[in-house]
Amino acid sequence: MRTARRLAAAGLLAATALTALTGQATADDTPTATPTATSTAGTDGPPTEAGTNFLTATVIKQGQQATASASAGDYLYWVVPADTGQNVTVKATVTFGSGSGAAAKHGASTWQLDVYDGLRRRQPCRYGAQTRTAAADAATVELACTLRPVRAYADTWSNDPLRGAYYLRLTALSVPEADLGQPVRAAVTATSHGTAGRDAVDGSVAPVVSANAPDVAPADGWAGTWWSPRWLWTGGGGLLAVLVALGAHRLARGPIRATSRQRPHQPDQPHYPRDPAGYGS
């Protein structure tokens, strides 16, 4: 009797252990959801959305027009690379309503385009209307901002723009309460011109790029840190200095005359009469 009970208890324990192991194996084989990076369709084409802060800014390329649908009162963020010597110009256009006109707009609004460098320092505009007020009957409002030349190195106390990522922020400063939430469509474009020759400096720093946007880089890569057109100007200036020195030496010395080497003058020797042949023999 006791033997039968022990066998039954042992069988029950074995069944329980087998069930637990089976359940654990099933749980281990079940796939779990893992977070993945957000991807947008058509990465080769221009972006059609914008971020809402610095961390979620949409990466765009220079010369590429990025668009986004939003609501009045939203903050829209993009990020674009800028390299040494470039003069970056950013243009933004805000279209009110769904694109059919200004029927959905009820009052005047003020819009602003801000540009920040990789250190999130707001950069002033050399020229361009970065803040504009749109009238009540306006269908669009256009903004523009041209930055100072991007530098490869700057002192720690200065606010000079450094090469790296540049954040573009488009927002409305003043919107009537009745217009908040009205649909708008934004389009931004960043272009640049210039080289690193005139604005080249001694020294360089690595491009200031945030870890949240590691793909921010020019299409052909970042410029080198040692070469700049200043080397050509330096070599040309040195050659010109040598030519000027030779010319000054020639003028100071005067013309060079070729003279033949002559023997020193010797006085005439006196002539004495010769003795006749056979004299004194």
Image (cartoon, rainbow, N blue to C red):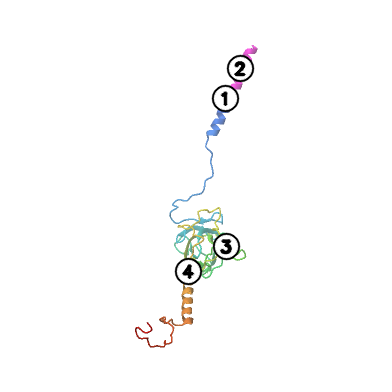
The numbered mark at residue 235 is 4
Of 148 and 84, nearer the camera is 84
Where is mark 3, residue-wise?
A: 177
- Label 4: state its secondary structure: helix
The first of marks 3 and 2 along the sequence is: 2
Where is mark 2, residue-wise?
A: 8
Name which residue type carries label 2: Ala
The first of marks 4 and 2 along the sequence is: 2
Mark 2 Cα shell of 10 Å, populated few (<14), some (14-19), many (≥20):
few
The first of marks 2 and 1 along the sequence is: 2
Give the number of the mark in front: 3 or 4.
Answer: 4
Picture layout, residue 243 above or below residue 119: below
Residue at horizontal 47 percent and vertical 76 percent from the top: 246
The first of marks 1 and 4 along the sequence is: 1
Name which residue type carries label 3: Glu
Name which residue type carries label 1: Leu
Residue at horizontal 57 percent and vertical 62 percent from the top: 177
Can you name the residue that lies furthest to the left here?
A: 277
Give the number of the mark in front: 4 or 2.
Answer: 4
Where is mark 1, residue-wise?
A: 18
Of 233 and 185, nearer the camera is 233
Q: Position of residue 191 (x, y in %)?
A: 47, 64
Picture layout, residue 249 above or below residue 105: below
The first of marks 3 and 4 along the sequence is: 3
- Span colored in magenta: 1-14
Give the number of the mark in front: 1 or 4.
Answer: 4
Q: Position of residue 269 (x, y in %)?
A: 42, 86
Q: How many marks?
A: 4
Q: Position of residue 221 (x, y in %)?
A: 47, 57
Q: Position of residue 199 (x, y in %)?
A: 52, 68
